[in-house]
Image (spheres, rainbow, N blue to C red):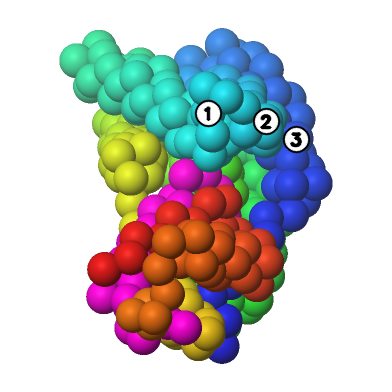
Amino acid sequence: MDEARVPPLDEGESLRTVVIALLANAGITVAKFVAATLTRSSAMLAEAFHASADTGNQVLLLLADRLARRPADASHPIGHGREAYFWALLAALGMFFTGALLAVRQGLIELFHPRHVNSPLAAYIVLGVALCLDGMSLLRAYRQLKHEAAALEIEFLEHFDRSSDPVGRAVFAEDAVATVGNLVAFAGIILDQLTGSPVFDAAGALIIGLFLAVVALDLTRRNRDFLVGRQTSPGIQEALRRLITRQADVVGVTEVWAIYVGPRRLWVVARIRLDDALGGPALRQRLRAIARTVEQQSPAVARVDLVPW
């Protein structure tokens, strides 16, 4: 990128992605609990716990999306952007405790108290519908992240790793695990029917729980990182350095810190060397002018603090 820019977050697109995932998960949750009751399948019950956790998570992500948009005020001069990371962190923990642990528990119960799957047709129908709905939601989340990656001129996986938007990342990760979970539950029930052994159904529940745990802990780690105060990529820091260096009267830039204060929102602190001829009111006026220029040319920058060095 030639400029220190981060493509602005399409709030409407992000909101639609979460709403679609929420509606899909709500319907899937009810269907999976009904199918689990009819079939007595632990893998299906694990997927019902999974879908229930995802539904609750989507509500928290909607809350994260809304609260993070609130403008700055006297108590929060850089805005409320980090609200997104707080609520996304709670959603990740909810996935772990409500989805992963309950799924693992159900798998262990069936291992010690095995029971065969009854009437698997209901499970096959529900899992097939769930696979289609989760796949559609996953495709939408993928397209959103892919579009953002193209705007940044980087690869999809690199953007997924670096993205400061916890909502888009969480929806994609949850939908990916849901798709895998549907396939695992389907395989567990089929193997139970073919072999007559309930071990495969129990193993399906355990695998679903472990997948959920891994993803939930990874999302927790990422959100904690942004809450603590994560810097942006070296490329954007260097672009900011070049932008500041090009300004009149700037002799050099010794340090640049660009810390995320919300999705696509940066707080930039730089130590700069100005022309020795500047002093007093002229120095302060020049610092303010440079800060305004950086903010105007980099819409993602929420605040710029320049320290003469």
Q: Which residue is mark 2?
A: 70
Q: CA distance from mark 2 to mark 1?
A: 10 Å
| Residue 73: x %, y % from top left | 62, 27
261 shown above or below 85: below
| Residue 151: x %, y % from top left | 65, 76
The disc, 2 or 1, on the residue closer to the chain's N-terminal end is 2
Q: Residue at x 67, y 30 (%)?
A: 70
Q: Residue at x 73, y 25 (%)?
A: 27
* Residue 270 lies in the magenta-colored region: yes
Element type where label 2 sits in the image: loop
Element type where label 1 sits in the image: loop
| Residue 200: x %, y % from top left | 32, 36
Q: CA distance from mark 3 to mark 1?
A: 28 Å
Along the line of sight, which residue is nearer the eye, 9 or 187? 9
Asked if residue 35 shows in the view, the reply is: no
| Mark 1 Cα shell of 10 Å, populated few (<14), some (14-19), many (≥20) | few
| Mark 2 Cα shell of 10 Å, populated few (<14), some (14-19), many (≥20) | few
The residue segment tinted magenta is: 249-273
Q: Which residue is mark 3?
A: 19
Name the amino acid type tagged 1. His
| Mark 3 Cα shell of 10 Å, populated few (<14), some (14-19), many (≥20) | some
Q: Which residue is mark 1?
A: 76
251 shown above or below 261: below
In the rendered view of the protein, which quadrant contains the C terminus? bottom left
The disc, 3 or 1, on the residue closer to the chain's N-terminal end is 3
Along the line of sight, which residue is nearer the eye, 21 or 195? 21
Name the amino acid type tagged 3. Val
Q: Nearer the viewer, mark 3 or mark 1?
A: 1
